[in-house]
């Protein structure tokens, strides 16, 4: 599973994230997206952990925590995708 880490400080590095998440278990991969045009970090990351139970613990502990001056938003990526795909679709009103 993968954790979406939102509201992330632009100063945060992959090493910073590795240090934080390694406290909860083995981290397999971290992705810290960069904007193609500006070259700046985009303010979010994806963290993939080896153990789903430890991932749940990290989400529970870190969601809403203040880190580097911002309140983090952590969501299991699978849950976020499920939530978005299960939204009811709204069609535009017809002109008839």
Image: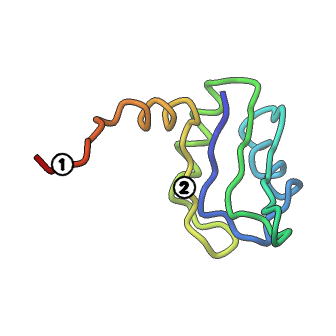
Q: Position of residue 68 (x, y in %)?
A: 70, 72
**Which picture quadrant has residue 6?**
bottom right
Residue at horizontal 43 percent and vertical 38 percent from the top = 84
Q: Earlier in the sequence, mark 2 or mark 1?
A: 2
Residue 73: mark: 2
Q: Is residue 53 left or right of residue 33?
A: left
Quick one: 19 or 40, which is closer to the camera?
40
Q: Position of residue 95 (x, y in %)?
A: 15, 51
Alpha carbon distance from label 2 to label 1: 35 Å
Q: Is residue 51 left or right of residue 95?
A: right
Estimate how packed mark 1 is, as few (under 14), some (14 to 19) or many (20 or more) residues with alpha carbons within 10 Å: few
Residue at horizontal 54 percent and vertical 43 percent from the top = 75
Q: Position of residue 10 (x, y in %)?
A: 75, 71
Location of the N terminus by quadrant is: top right
Quick one: 26 or 84, which is closer to the camera?
84
Q: Is residue 46 above or below residue 40?
A: above
Q: Is residue 9 left or right of residue 70?
A: right
Q: Is residue 72 above or below residue 4?
A: below
**Which picture quadrant has residue 12?**
bottom right
In the image, farthest residue toward the front: 96
Q: Is residue 46 left or right of residue 37?
A: left
Residue at horizontal 25 percent and vertical 48 percent from the top = 92
Circle 1 sits on which residue? 93
SS type, badge 2: strand
Quick one: 52 or 11, which is closer to the camera?
11
Residue at horizontal 64 percent and vertical 33 percent from the top = 55
In the image, farthest residue toward the right: 15
State which mark lies toward you, 2 or 1.
Answer: 1
């Amino acid at each position: 599973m993968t954790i979406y880490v939102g509201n992330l400080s632009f100063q945060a590095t992959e090493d910073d994230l590795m240090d934080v998440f390694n406290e909860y278990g083995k981290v397999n991969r971290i992705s810290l997206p960069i904007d193609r045009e500006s070259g700046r970090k985009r303010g979010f990351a994806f963290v993939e952990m080896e153990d789903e139970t430890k991932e749940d613990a990290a989400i529970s502990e870190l969601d809403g925590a203040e880190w580097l001056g911002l309140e983090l938003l952590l969501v299991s990526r699978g849950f976020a995708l499920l939530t978005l795909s299960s939204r009811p679709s709204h069609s535009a009103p017809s002109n008839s």
